[in-house]
Image (tube, rainbow, N blue to C red):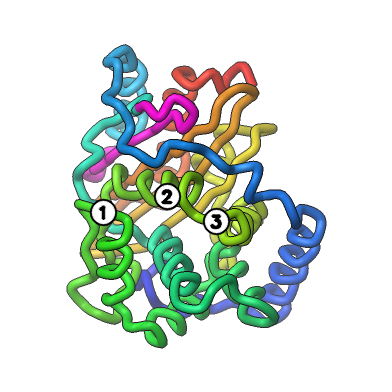
């Protein structure tokens, strides 16, 4: 996903087989309980932040601003147990979603035909866990492209999410951190257990290397070692900018959080600098969650 956000990812066949085989083993080991693990009750809009995290937000922003290259960032972290916004910064401003939009593609598929089975289940799991663009592009075209986004916007009540201007560029769908967190609130509070388990098992088993060879363990996976997480990452290029999003669910020893950190830079930045900055920023925010004690 390094040139056009919705172009098929090119990888030698043996690497794809290795990724898929590893995912199948992980799903077999972890099957049967993910729906319960990630159930929460934050169905209503969360309460406003208490305003005590200003220093942590400033530290996180500094990590991103220090990269130069015209960074733009939005942040929202919600405590799903208290149903309260823990931290936010420009959370209502839409950003290119990149592969985070695959959550909407998967939810729309489930709405239309239920939890997939057989080879389709394997394909959708790989789309979510290993960020397979081939599957995403097929489902996007098969199920109406931008209409997928419009249906999910209406169903979930998303207020800052719009389909891509170019109907074929699904990765250029724009979402705000608030809307991404709203998707996770729906997934944990309203989605039936079987559907929730199907999605979160894939997200729990996201391998370090995605189908296109990108190291997708930046942000949440790297900042929360030893902590339970279920993630959908996003990276790529849109409108001449490099996009890097880390989003997902994190469970500490005592709390469950939904996290969305969405960033972009002009295309002069290199990927190691961008991934390091996002991970450092999230590490700064971690102090507000009790996750540092997990």
Q: Which residue is drawn at 34% across and 35% down?
A: 76
Give the secondary structure at mark 1: loop
The segment highlighted magenta reads 67-84
- Picture coordinates of residue 261, whole percent (x, y): 37, 41
Q: How crowded is mark 1: few (under 14 residues within 10 Å), some or many (20 or more)?
A: some
Q: In this view, does 290 lie above or below 120?
A: above
Q: Is residue 127 above or below residue 251?
A: below
Q: Which of the two discs, 2 and 1, labels the residue nearer the N terminus?
A: 1
Report if residue 196 lies within the magenta region.
no
Mark linked to residue 263 = none
Q: Which of the two discs, 3 and 2, labels the residue nearer the N terminus?
A: 2
Q: How many marks?
A: 3
Give the secondary structure at mark 2: helix
Using the rendered view, name the quadrant where residue 87 is placed. top left
- Residue 206 showing in the rendered view: no
Q: Residue at x 47, y 45 (%)?
A: 189
Task: Quote the CA–CA distance across marks 2 and 1.
Answer: 11 Å
Q: Residue at x 32, y 64 (%)?
A: 152
- Which residue position holds label 3? 192
Report if residue 71 lies within the magenta region.
yes
Q: Which residue is drawn at 39% across and 79% down?
A: 140
Residues marked 3 and 2 touching at CB (< 8 Å): no
Give the secondary structure at mark 3: loop
> On the rendered image, what quadrant is the N terminus found in?
bottom left
- On screen, residue 8 versus residue 125, left or right, reads left
- Which residue position holds label 2? 186
- Viewer-closest of 161 and 41: 41
- Which residue position holds label 1? 158
Using the rendered view, name the quadrant where residue 37 is placed. top right
């Amino acid at each position: 996903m390094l040139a056009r956000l919705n172009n098929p990812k090119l990888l030698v066949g043996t690497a794809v087989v290795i990724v898929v085989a590893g995912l199948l083993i992980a799903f077999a080991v972890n099957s049967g309980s993910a729906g319960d693990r990630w159930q929460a009750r934050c169905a209503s809009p969360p309460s406003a932040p208490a305003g005590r995290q200003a220093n942590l937000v400033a530290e996180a922003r500094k990590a991103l601003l220090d990269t130069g290259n015209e960074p733009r960032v939005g942040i929202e972290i919600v405590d799903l147990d208290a149903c309260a916004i823990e931290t936010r910064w420009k959370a209502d401003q839409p950003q290119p979603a990149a592969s985070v939009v695959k959550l909407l593609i998967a939810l729309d598929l489930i709405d239309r035909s239920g939890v997939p089975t057989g080879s389709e289940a394997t394909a959708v799991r790989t789309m979510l866990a290993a960020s397979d663009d081939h599957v995403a592009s097929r489902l996007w075209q098969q199920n109406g492209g931008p209409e997928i986004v419009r249906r999910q916007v209406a169903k979930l009540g998303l207020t800052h999410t719009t389909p891509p201007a170019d109907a074929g560029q699904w990765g250029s769908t724009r979402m705000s951190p608030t809307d991404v967190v709203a998707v996770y609130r729906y997934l944990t509070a309203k989605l039936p257990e079987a559907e929730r388990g199907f999605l979160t098992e894939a997200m729990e088993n996201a391998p370090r290397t995605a189908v296109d060879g990108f190291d997708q363990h930046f942000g949440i996976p790297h900042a929360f070692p030893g902590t339970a997480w279920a993630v959908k990452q996003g990276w790529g290029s849109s409108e001449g900018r490099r996009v890097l999003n880390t989003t997902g669910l994190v469970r500490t020893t005592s709390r469950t959080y939904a996290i969305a950190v969405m960033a972009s830079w002009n295309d002069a930045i290199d990927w190691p600098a961008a991934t390091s900055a996002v991970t450092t920023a999230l590490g700064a925010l971690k102090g507000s969650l009790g996750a540092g004690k997990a």
